[in-house]
């Protein structure tokens, strides 16, 4: 959005729940990324178009299995200490360490070593080429923290007692559970070209959509990123500024039970065919979403856009076809079997999506059991196998770490993917991704990615519901926030400020 021009003392920014951790290895959801993207930086970063550009370092690639990063002069942590190669190695090795139980270890699977080859130089040696890793280093897995601070904080690192130490243009202020996390402008930021106008951003968790809407109307909340449907959005028209940016995420149904009724791809496809997505978009998203032709949206085309666009155009349209859905499962013996769906019971949008899937499932002969949980409990579907037990699937508005369709698809389509909850595998998909990962040429890499994309859409390990826009909502006196989904991985408030 247009850059702000006036200084602002303090604003309140809402996320759908409180921030749980500031430790990058455990950052796995919207509140955490919204906060850490203000505070922490990586060797590389993503610009608002999703393109990977230099971050705190400049990079050269001497050969297909060597990445060399040189930290820019003067880069410091908030406490004034220089960011060293040792800090970078420490941060990336924490991501790789399976004993710490972080979410991103698999992204480093082709890394042989990460070493400090000079005080300001880090060399990553690979066992085989890995051009996916560059995107990951420009996202959550690449955020750098200070080694001595982490070691001193111990088990409290990343929580309200221990805090964090990064190098971003905002630094951590007060953080109180049940109140807010404050990001305070870092007036000694190492890059003199970056001068944020907002002195303090208080991030608060507001679970209830009605309360979030009321806060935006009253002015108690100055801004928010809406990653999914906001049923009350029509109440905000003419009262705030609503900007629809490029989304990188998909509203989808995650299949999580290998032994359930959805184990057969024909049943998954039939369920998808029976969905009334148009009504869901009209009534729940109020038009701020589109019907998907794949499992990742066009906003993820951070490179080789022509290749991705042509492939997407060639994919078949997704339309409701009840007769076709029933024919697809005829003779499979699914009549009367139960589909168990997990969803957020207190969220009207999640309830509406569950109702849409229930109607579709019953139309093809299934019984449906709904399992509502609270918003605070819902994250357990993603991280706790016991919590998922007996549930055939649950909903997500999900994203990859960088602007490449493979970034999300790989998480649920590769055997070691962090979101492959039921063991889906297709050797041809794996081969296409492995080939793409090794290709330096962007167009050749994109061609392999779209090859995998077409097969995944046929297998449908997840069922795509809709592609939401990335909706930025601010009071009318604010402008300058990044409107695209890049806000999740790079500083989104550097240009935020008041209007003249």
Image: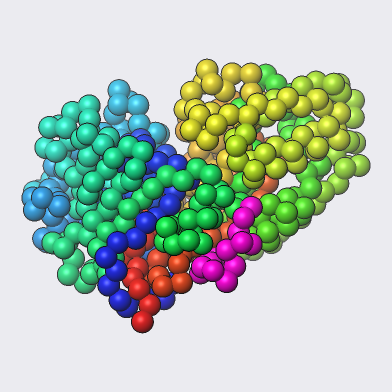
Residue at image x 46%, y 46%?
206
Q: Which residues are magenta?
A: 231-244
Q: Quadrant of the C terminus?
A: bottom left
Instruction: Please give left or right for residue 390 compared with residue 477 in the image.
Output: right
Q: Is residue 303 above or below residue 104?
A: below
- What is the number of callouts on the image? 0
Q: Which colour scheme appears in the figure?
A: rainbow
Picture quadrant where residue 48 is located: bottom left
Residue at image x 68%, y 61%?
287
Q: In this view of the protein, which residue sits in the foreground, 268 or 337?
A: 337
Q: Position of residue 349 (x, y in %)?
A: 64, 45
Q: Is residue 25 above or below residue 138?
A: above
Residue at image x 55%, y 48%?
209
Picture quadrant where residue 372 is located: top right
Q: In this view of the protein, which residue sits in the foreground, 66 or 274?
A: 274
Q: Is residue 302 visible?
A: no
Q: Position of residue 301 (x, y in %)?
A: 52, 60
Q: Is residue 352 above or below residue 196?
A: above
Q: Is residue 355 visible?
A: yes
Outermost residue to the bottom: 500
Instruction: Please give left or right for residue 153 compared with residue 380 in the image.
Output: left
Residue at image x 35%, y 26%?
101
Q: Position of residue 420 (x, y in %)?
A: 54, 31
Q: Is residue 232 magenta?
A: yes
Instruction: Please give left or right for residue 297 compared with residue 89 in the image.
Output: right
Q: Is residue 67 magenta?
A: no
Q: In this view of the protein, which residue sits in the foreground, 99 or 232?
A: 232
Q: Position of residue 171 (x, y in %)?
A: 22, 52
């Amino acid at each position: 959005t247009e850059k702000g021009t006036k200084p602002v003392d303090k604003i309140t920014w809402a996320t759908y729940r409180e921030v749980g951790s500031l430790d990058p290895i455990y950052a796995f959801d919207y509140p955490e990324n919204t906060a850490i993207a203000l505070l922490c930086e990586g060797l590389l970063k993503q610009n608002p178009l999703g393109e990977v550009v230099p971050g705190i370092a400049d990079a050269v690639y001497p050969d297909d299995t060597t990445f060399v990063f040189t930290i820019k002069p003067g880069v410091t942590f908030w406490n004034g200490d220089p960011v060293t190669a040792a800090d970078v190695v420490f941060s990336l090795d924490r991501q790789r360490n399976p004993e710490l139980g972080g979410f991103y270890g698999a992204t480093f699977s082709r890394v042989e070593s990460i070493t400090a080859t000079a005080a300001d130089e880090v060399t990553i040696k690979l066992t085989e080429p890995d051009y996916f890793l560059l995107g990951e280093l420009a996202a959550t897995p690449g955020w750098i923290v200070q080694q001595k601070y982490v070691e001193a904080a111990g088990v409290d690192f990343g929580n309200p007692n221990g805090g964090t130490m990064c190098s971003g243009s905002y630094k951590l202020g007060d953080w109180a559970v049940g109140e807010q996390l404050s990001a305070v402008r870092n007036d000694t930021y190492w890059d003199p070209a970056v001068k944020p106008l907002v002195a303090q951003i208080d991030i608060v968790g507001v679970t209830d959509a009605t309360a979030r809407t009321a806060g935006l109307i009253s002015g108690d909340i100055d801004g928010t990123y809406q990653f999914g449907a906001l049923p009350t959005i029509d109440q905000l028209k003419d009262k705030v500024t609503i900007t629809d940016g490029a989304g990188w995420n998909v509203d989808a149904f995650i299949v999580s039970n290998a032994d359930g009724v959805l184990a057969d791809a024909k049943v998954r496809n039939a369920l998808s065919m029976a969905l009334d997505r148009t009504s869901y978009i009209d009534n729940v998203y109020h038009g701020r979403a589109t019907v998907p032709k794949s499992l990742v949206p066009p906003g993820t085309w951070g490179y080789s856009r022509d290749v991705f666009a042509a492939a997407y155009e060639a994919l078949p349209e997704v339309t409701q076809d009840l007769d076709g859905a029933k024919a697809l499962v005829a003779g499979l013996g699914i009549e009367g079997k139960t589909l168990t769906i997990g969803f957020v019971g207190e969220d009207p949008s999640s309830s509406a999506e569950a109702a849409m899937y229930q109607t579709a499932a019953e139309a093809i002969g299934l019984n449906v059991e709904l399992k509502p949980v609270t918003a605070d409990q819902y994250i357990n579907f993603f991280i706790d196998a016991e919590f998922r037990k007996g549930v055939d699937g649950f909903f997500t508005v999900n994203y990859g770490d960088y602007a490449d369709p493979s970034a999300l698809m790989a998480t649920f389509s590769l055997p070691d993917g962090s979101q492959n909850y039921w063991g889906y595998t297709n050797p041809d998909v794996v081969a296409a991704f492995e080939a793409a990962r090794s290709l330096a040429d962007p167009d050749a890499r994109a061609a392999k990615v779209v090859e995998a994309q077409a097969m995944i859409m046929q297998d449908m390990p997840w069922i795509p519901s809709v592609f939401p826009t990335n909706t930025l909502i601010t009071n009318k006196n604010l402008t300058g926030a990044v409107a695209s989904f890049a806000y999740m991985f790079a500083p989104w408030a550097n240009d935020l400020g008041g209007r003249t």
